Structure formats: structure tokens, C-alpha cells
Amino acid sequence: MAIELRSDSIARGTVVLAKYRTRSAITDIPVNCGEILTDLNGMISFSPSKSSSDEAYYCVWFIHVHNNYKIQLYFTDFVMLDFLSCNSSSLLVYDGTPLGSHILGQLCKTPERRFISTSNSISIVYSSRDSIRRNGSWPGLTFRATYSSILPNNQSVTLSCFTNFMEAQISLSYLQSMGYSPETVFLNDPKCRPRVISGWLEFHVPYQGCLTVEQAETDTISYTNKLWAYAAEPVITHRKKLSLTLKCEMYQEAMVDTIYHADDTIENTLTQYGLFSANLTFFQSASFLYPVLQYPYYIQHNQDLYLQASLITSDPSLILFVETCVASPDRLNFSRNIYYIIHNGCSRAPGYRTYYSSSQSTVRFGFRAFSFLRQDSIVYLRCKLIVCKQYSYPSRCSQGCIKRHKRDAQLSHEEVYVVAGPVELVQ
């Protein structure tokens, strides 16, 4: 937050006194419901479950589309279960990621039910500060929402975020309309030059080059560069300058594209949300030389299992941490009938141990085949991985095992979910 004070020579002796305090944007409750949605159109619904009577909710639905789209979100139903619902619960819509973007609306405080994102991502965050059961009743909110993707017109500048680089394209006809040529357009590093492809000027911008700036933000790790256009004739002053900030904000597990219509203003920012990628692989021994290539992976009871989680990145400053790992007989449901191998960074499985890795973006661990396989002979594993910036302390990656829920000390990390299996017990 910034405060700007302006005065003239008349305002002598004026004193301004302000007090401020900070608070965490993260609830004490861990995320226990929600999902990532990547289809161009979809529906979300939520109602408190009476079967979870001792559990408070913190739910995040992150909608993430691709290829030049924005998102239109419409709440078809929104019901407060009692008159205290908005005191104990909240439902917010964020213009991007769940913590790192501004709020489009809070449904308890505004009658607005339709929202449009400014980028390719939008988030719905529901939280109840009390347990679901209170004096025999279930307070909270229920809702149903649909979303659709919108393709903007007047596409003159595009930005695409990939795992290790971004691509920026600017229309040659748009440049010419402003009086610029390809030779007058530059990045932060003037040595990084573009190429001309089918009427577009294309910049290939590596995250680790071209003077790209990396920064850990609220719930993303961002990579920023700047695209400048300079007039070849400095004596011409009426021409509007072109200055575009290119910003890729990486959040979770994939990559997407967005489109932006550039105005003839001095400053514009193109923000693109992307998703981190990671692999979860079984290995045949503690040497981690021979990965398991065929599935189902047949194992014996009490056999030692070895897993490697690897972040797909060229950024050496990123750290990977295994926050939670669960086994489930259902590949599509990791909330019921699960067996914890790791929970809140703490080991739960028998024979659990970690192994050395030369890269901080790779984690290796092992455990014994568990009794869970006696009930279900086939299981899948899903791990929640945390991506942190090196030297961003304290971060979730530096906290290690947390035996009890407590407020996160640092917001600048991302989460990635990966699945491996199936693993099948040989009878």
C-alpha cells in the first residue's frame, strides 16, 4: 500500500499522522476443498457437508484457461444458511490467483453476481472461521456458479508463459500505425533481438536471461521484462511512446497463453498466469538410477518403495518441498479412504526416510509398502508440492514438519499436485 502526499507552498506547517498494522491474508485453516479448473467452460457448486461436522472450511477454486481468453463468472445461486452466515463465512472472487490479486467482489457485501477477469485466471475463495457444526446447526453459505471463456477482439500484443521462458508478440501493423519499425523495439537487454514471423514481431525471453527480473510475490513467482519502442527521430515529440511491462506469474502446474490489446499509452502491463510442472516417479532402488517405466507397479507387502519428485524448471533458485502425500484407491478422489504418507511435511508411513539429491528442486524419499494395500490391492499416490524462492525466509519450505496447524509465516510459495501409480500388491 502506498500513500502519496502533495502540497503547495501555502500548506506550511501541515502535519499528517497515520497508523498502520499488518495481518496475514491466509486463514489459520488449511485448504481442504476446491480444485483447479482448466476447461474453457465449467460449473462449480458447494454446500457444507453435515458429515464434516467438526471441520472448518477453507476452499479455493482456481480457474485457469488458455489461448487469449478472459473468464466470465456468474453465480446462478447464492444462499446464506442463516442470518449469521456472513459473520462466520466469506465468499470472495479474485482477479487472478487466490492471494496475489485484487478482489473483484465479496458476495456478502455486494449484489453483483457476474464478474469478468482481466487475464486468463480467476479464483473463488470460501472460508468459514468456525467449525461447520455450531449449536446443532450448520452455518455457512451455499452457491452454484458457471464460467465461460471470452476471446477479446483487437489482438495487437500477445504474451505466452512457458516453463522456462516467455514469448511476446507485437503486431507489425500496430507498430507501423504508431510510427515504429522493428529496429526501434527493445527489451531490458538491447542484445535480445526479435524475429519477424507472419506479420508479428516475436521476442523469445528466457527467465534466466535478457535482464529478466525474478521476484517472489504473494502466491506466485513472477518474471518481468519490459518492451520499449523508441522514436527514430528524437525531434518528433507528439508521438506517443510504447512501453509494455511483460510479466509471467507462475502458479502451480502448467503453461497458458493470454492476449492483450495495447493502447497508445505510455505504460501498460501484460500479466500472464502460468502453472509450474513437476514429475512424481517411482524408482526401483535407493540409488535412483532406474525409474519404474511400466504400470501397474507390482510390489510385495512390506517392500521398500522409492519416489522422486522433480520440478521442471531451469531456475536454480527454486526449492521444492513435499508438503503432503496420500494414497487412494480412486485416482479421481483423494479426499476419502486415504492413507497419509506425508502430512503437513511430517512422515506418516512406516520406514519413511529421505535421500540426498544434488538439486534443491528435486526431492527423494522412500517408505515401506503399507497396510493400506491389504484393503485395496491397487492404489494411486498424489503429492502436494510447495515451490519456494531461495533465501525467501521464512517460507513454507524452511518450516519443515508442522505437527499442528498454524498461520503460514510467508506467503511467497506455490503449490503443485502430482499423481503417480497405480501400485498393485502381488497376492
Image (tube, rainbow, N blue to C red):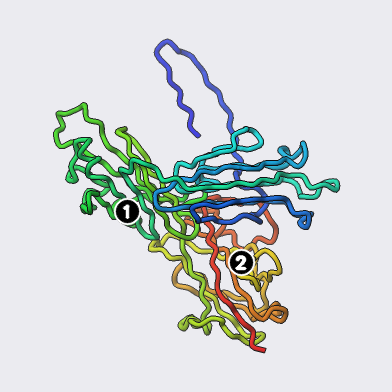
Tell me the residue at 30%/38% (across/down).
Answer: 243
Q: What element carries label 1?
A: strand
Tell me the residue at 40%/50% (across/down).
Answer: 248
Nearest the viewer among 313 and 34 is 34
Q: Tell me if 16 is positioned left or right of 129 in this view.
A: left
Nearest the viewer among 282 and 191 is 282
Residue 270 placement: quadrant: top left
Q: x, y percentage for residue 377?
A: 67, 81
Q: x, y percentage for residue 46?
A: 67, 50
- Give amino acid for label 2: Leu
Q: Is residue 276 above or below residue 83?
A: below
Total numbered labels:
2
Tell me the residue at 19%/45% (across/down).
Answer: 182
- Give amino acid for label 1: Glu
Q: x, y percentage for residue 44?
A: 61, 51
Q: Tell me if 322 is positioned left or right of 189 in this view.
A: right
Residue 232 placement: quadrant: top left
Circle nearer the N terminus (1, 2): 1
Query: Mark 1, mark 2: which one is toward the viewer?
Result: 2
Query: Where residue 332 is drawn, which disc sits there?
Result: 2
Q: In this view, does 309 lie above or below 208?
A: below
Q: Mark 1 points at which residue?
A: 167
Q: Residues within 10 Å of mark 1 (few under 14, many from 20)?
A: some
Q: x, y percentage for residue 321?
A: 54, 64
